[in-house]
């Protein structure tokens, strides 16, 4: 669904600064292997969020001793996350209400 | 705020450090790939298999790169830079066309810039006094009823008794002063010369809110009694005393009378007419007595809270009262209050606007000319445009490309026009009628630069839009089917060219007839018979100081052959 990936990314990097692969990995883990994010969707989304000023990037040495680009949440990103999360709650609540009723 | 800055910084980085950004994206994706491979290895795959599996899960890397790039949303700037590069190439390919178009537009823009530099200096730039809009010229406004022209108002000088009443009865002014100015014989050291001397009333310098650079002004008492003393301009101080502090107290002989220098005015102050020396006005007993002796000029500074209209209304009331009180001297006379700037600029305003109108027409003609050139070029490049369209460029994209080309042309022309204007404004200054105010202030400043830039942008649309619209609107099928270099001009294009040519000729006729009329009246003015033969007649003027008046006839006879 449009915008869902953005919400997931924001939520994940809110926990700690993380590089792209770890973000994808974490999403897979936390969703118990239900949500699989390919890099072809992940990196465009990351770059878009960075250019919106919601996340910022920094090159660091990763746990495998290689240079990796770490993303972390900005102040504006924190606000956006709160709003997106609220939106999602509303939307998913509404959808499940309908689905259950039928 | 900081978020906005971040976005801007990132956008800049994507445009200007493109290579670096792409490299980083590569590295980022490479890292991802490596981690996928590592993951595969831990599950027991061979390196070969792990790599293959990783690549498969990652999907199309190139596509993801392209999308990441798009997400940076800097296509607009990217496209602009690409369009500019393309425009440069396209202009270089047809240097003859480019040179001609730039030349034509440079003439148009240059002429406009030159005239605007005059408009800017004479009409727009504020006078270099403090709160110049509050400084007004006060005059005796004489109303006469002419049989053929109805009521005519004329502003005249003022007499001292009337001025005193204006001064004492009004409340709209912070300061009001009379003054008189003339070329006076002045001796400084051993040299005698004419310098502009102005005799001023008590509040004169308060009207302009100036302070002396060094020394002091005359005291109110000194001005009232017309005592000895002189203020000199900064320019006079520099040229005659080398800017030395020792000038204070030294004597300058004006009309043979030695006057000690009391002070020096700040640079740039020279009211009126680039005055060199100011002396306290000596008002003759006759001037003191007769209301009809309109021998003085007057200036005033309106109080900050008083609008011009109210000051004028008050002075009109005072004028009416004085007319009733002293009908023999003040019949049909009231008071005129005119902003100093309006008074200085006066009739020249119309002339300058006329000139501005004329060069605007020149610019329009230049635009029409360039548009016709571009239309011709558009015909020649239909195939190029068709090819771009066939390769997927939208009409809007092609339009933008063509307009960028016009913009580039226009900006180059604007820069050359600025050079032309630099010389042109000098020529204008040299040709300017005597008495054009504020001549020395004419030059290229940031307002003129902004004007040139604006005119260049607008002209690029004026001459570029129509040809671009025609060039980008084409039937793909038809154009691509036509064989080889032969291309047919569409009916619309022919009609457009006709319209442009007609418009251009119409404008040229307007301009020529205007210029013709001007020249005709100029010639007529020169051919007025004077009633005598002016050949070999010289006019000479000599000023004889009062003490030497008796010797004047003898001196004059010495000049006779």
Image (cartoon, rainbow, N blue to C red):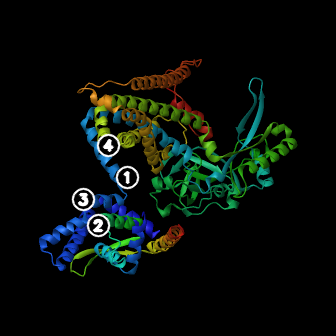
Front label number (4 vs 1): 4
For mark 3, give the secondary structure.
helix
Nearest the eye: B187 or B329: B329
The verdict on a common chain for dots 2 and 3 is no
Query: Vertical placement of B61 versus B366: above or below?
Result: below
Which chain does the numbered disc 3 sit on?
B
Label 3 crowd bin: few (<14), some (14–19), many (20+), radius 10 Å:
few
Task: Where is residue A50? Give x, y as percent.
Answer: 37, 67
Callouts 2 and 4 close, C-beta under 8 Å: no
Nearest the eye: B353 or B392: B392
The Cα–Cα distance between marks 2 and 1, rounded to whole angstroms, is 26 Å
Query: Vertical placement of B5 versus B371: above or below?
Result: below
Q: Which residue is rendered at x = 55% and y = 42% of the image?
A: B437
Q: Is residue B349 visible?
A: yes
Callouts 3 and 1 close, C-beta under 8 Å: no
Disc sitting over residue B76 in the figure: 1
- Mark 2, residue position: A39
- Mark 4, residue position: B392
The verdict on a common chain for dots 2 and 1 is no
For mark 1, give the secondary structure.
helix
Task: Where is residue A28? Give x, y as percent.
Answer: 33, 75
Disc sitting over residue B62 in the figure: 3
């Amino acid at each position: 669904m449009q915008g869902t990936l953005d919400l997931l990314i924001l939520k994940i990097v809110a926990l700690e600064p993380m590089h792209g692969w770890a973000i994808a990995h974490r999403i897979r883990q936390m969703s118990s292997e239900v949500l699989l994010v390919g890099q072809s969707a992940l990196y465009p989304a990351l770059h878009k969020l960075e250019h919106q000023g919601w996340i910022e990037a920094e090159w660091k040495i990763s746990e495998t001793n290689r240079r990796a680009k770490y993303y972390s949440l900005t102040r504006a990103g924190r606000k956006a996350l709160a709003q997106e999360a609220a939106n999602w709650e509303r939307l998913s609540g509404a959808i499940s209400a309908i689905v259950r009723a039928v | 705020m900081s978020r906005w800055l971040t976005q801007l910084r990132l956008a800049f980085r994507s445009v200007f450090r493109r290579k670096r950004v792409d490299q980083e994206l590569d590295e980022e994706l490479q890292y991802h790939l490596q981690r996928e491979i590592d993951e595969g290895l831990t599950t027991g795959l061979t390196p070969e298999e792990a790599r293959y599996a990783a690549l498969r899960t990652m999907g199309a890397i190139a596509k993801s790169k392209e999308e990441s790039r798009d997400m940076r949303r800097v296509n607009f700037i990217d496209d602009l830079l690409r369009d500019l590069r393309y425009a440069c190439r396209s202009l270089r390919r047809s240097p003859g066309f480019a040179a001609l178009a730039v030349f034509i537009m440079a003439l148009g823009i240059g002429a406009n810039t030159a005239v605007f530099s005059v408009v800017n200096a004479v009409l727009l730039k504020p006078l270099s006094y403090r709160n110049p809009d509050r400084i007004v010229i006060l005059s005796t406004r004489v109303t006469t009823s002419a049989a053929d022209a109805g009521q005519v108002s004329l502003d005249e000088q003022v007499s001292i008794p009337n001025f005193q009443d204006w001064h004492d009865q009004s409340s709209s002014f912070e300061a009001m002063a009379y003054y008189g100015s003339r070329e006076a014989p002045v001796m400084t050291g051993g040299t005698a010369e004419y310098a502009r001397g102005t005799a001023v009333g008590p509040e004169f310098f308060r009207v302009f809110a100036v302070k002396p650079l060094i020394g002091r002004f005359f005291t109110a008492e000194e001005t009232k009694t017309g005592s000895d003393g002189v203020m000199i301009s900064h320019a006079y101080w520099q040229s005659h005393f080398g800017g030395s502090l020792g000038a204070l107290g030294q004597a300058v002989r004006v009309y043979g009378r030695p006057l000690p220098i009391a002070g020096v005015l700040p640079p740039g102050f020279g009211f009126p007419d680039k005055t060199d020396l100011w002396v306290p006005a000596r008002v003759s007993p006759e001037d003191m007595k007769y209301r009809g002796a309109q021998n003085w000029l007057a200036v005033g500074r309106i109080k900050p809270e008083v609008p011009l209209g109210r000051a004028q209304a008050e002075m009109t009331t005072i004028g009416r009262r004085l007319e009733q009180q002293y009908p023999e001297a003040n019949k049909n006379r009231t008071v005129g209050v005119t902003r100093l700037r309006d008074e200085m600029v006066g009739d020249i305003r119309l002339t300058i606007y006329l000139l501005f109108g004329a060069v605007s027409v020149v610019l329009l003609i230049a635009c029409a000319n360039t548009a016709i050139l571009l239309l011709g070029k558009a015909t020649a490049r239909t195939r190029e445009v068709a090819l771009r369209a066939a390769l997927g460029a939208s009409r809007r994209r092609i339009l933008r490309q063509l307009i960028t080309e016009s913009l580039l042309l226009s900006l180059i022309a604007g820069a050359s026009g600025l050079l032309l204007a630099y010389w042109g404004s000098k020529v204008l200054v040299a040709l300017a009628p005597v008495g054009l105010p504020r001549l020395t202030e004419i030059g290229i400043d940031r307002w003129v630069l902004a004007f040139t830039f604006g005119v260049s942008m607008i002209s690029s649309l004026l001459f570029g839009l129509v040809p671009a619209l025609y060039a980008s609107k084409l039937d793909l099928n038809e154009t691509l089917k036509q064989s080889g270099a032969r291309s047919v001009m569409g009916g619309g294009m022919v009609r457009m060219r006709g319209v442009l040519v007609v418009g251009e000729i119409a404008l040229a006729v307007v301009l020529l007839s205007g210029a013709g009329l001007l020249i005709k009246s100029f010639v007529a003015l020169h051919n007025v018979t004077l009633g005598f033969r002016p050949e070999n007649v010289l006019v000479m003027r000599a000023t004889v100081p009062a003490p030497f008046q008796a010797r004047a006839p003898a001196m004059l006879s010495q000049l006779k052959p």
